[in-house]
Image: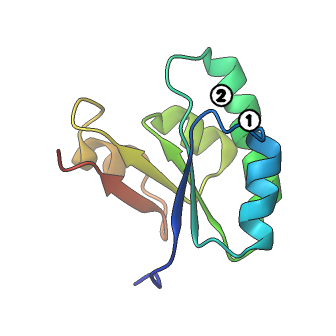
Amino acid sequence: MKEPFGLYLIASDPTAGYEALARAAVECKVRYLQLRMKGLPRERVLKTARMYREITRNSDTRFIVNDDLETAMACGADGLHLGQHDLPLAEARRKWNVPGRIFGLSTH
């Protein structure tokens, strides 16, 4: 399924806070919202990811998790973005074989 284009917002330590940013993104109908919390404890990332899932559920905003397949699966994200040194894309697709999931890959 082809997704329409739109603004892709990456949330990485936002000044306004993660929750405020997610709510604003949904209110403004940002098409994609990626949660990026590098180097933080998994429990904290998962808690924020679950909050993002609730905020984006039934909205026009697609929720993408950065780097962490397990977190993306646990919170029911719409997709996963992988860097060059993360899990290989083919393996991520195999492990999370759910129709409609979005996979992105850094190219540099």
Please state the horizontal and vertical placement of residue 53, each as a whole percent of the image: 73, 52
Residue at 65% from the left image edge and 28% from the top image edge = 45
Please state the horizontal and vertical placement of residue 20, each as a whole percent of the image: 82, 48
Please state the horizontal and vertical placement of residue 40, each as a whole percent of the image: 59, 17
Q: Nearer the viewer, residue 16 or 106?
A: 16
Give the total number of marks visible in the rendering: 2
Judged left or right of residue 74, residue 58 is: right
Reply above or below: 36 against 43. below
On-image quarter of the N terminus? bottom left
The disc label shown at residue 71, or none? none
At label 1, counting other C-alpha atoms closer than 10 Å, the crowd grade (few under 14, some 14-19, many 20 or more) is: some
At label 2, counting other C-alpha atoms closer than 10 Å, the crowd grade (few under 14, some 14-19, many 20 or more) is: some
Residue 67 in sight from this viewpoint? yes
Residue at 17% from the left image edge and 44% from the top image edge = 108
Reply above or below: 94 against 58. above
Three-letter code for the amino acid on which mark 1 is drawn? Thr
Rounded to the nearest whole Å, what is the CA distance between mark 1 and mark 2? 5 Å
Color style of the picture: rainbow
Three-letter code for the amino acid on which mark 2 is drawn? Val
Residue 58 in sight from this viewpoint? no
In what element is the residue under mark 1? helix
Q: Quadrant of residue 57?
A: bottom right
Reply above or below: 13 against 21. above
- Which residue in the protein does label 1 denote? 48
Q: Quadrant of residue 51?
A: top right
- Contact flag, marks 1 and 2 (Cβ < 8 Å): yes
- Which residue in the protein does label 2 denote? 45
In what element is the residue under mark 2? helix
Residue at 65% from the left image edge and 51% from the top image edge = 76
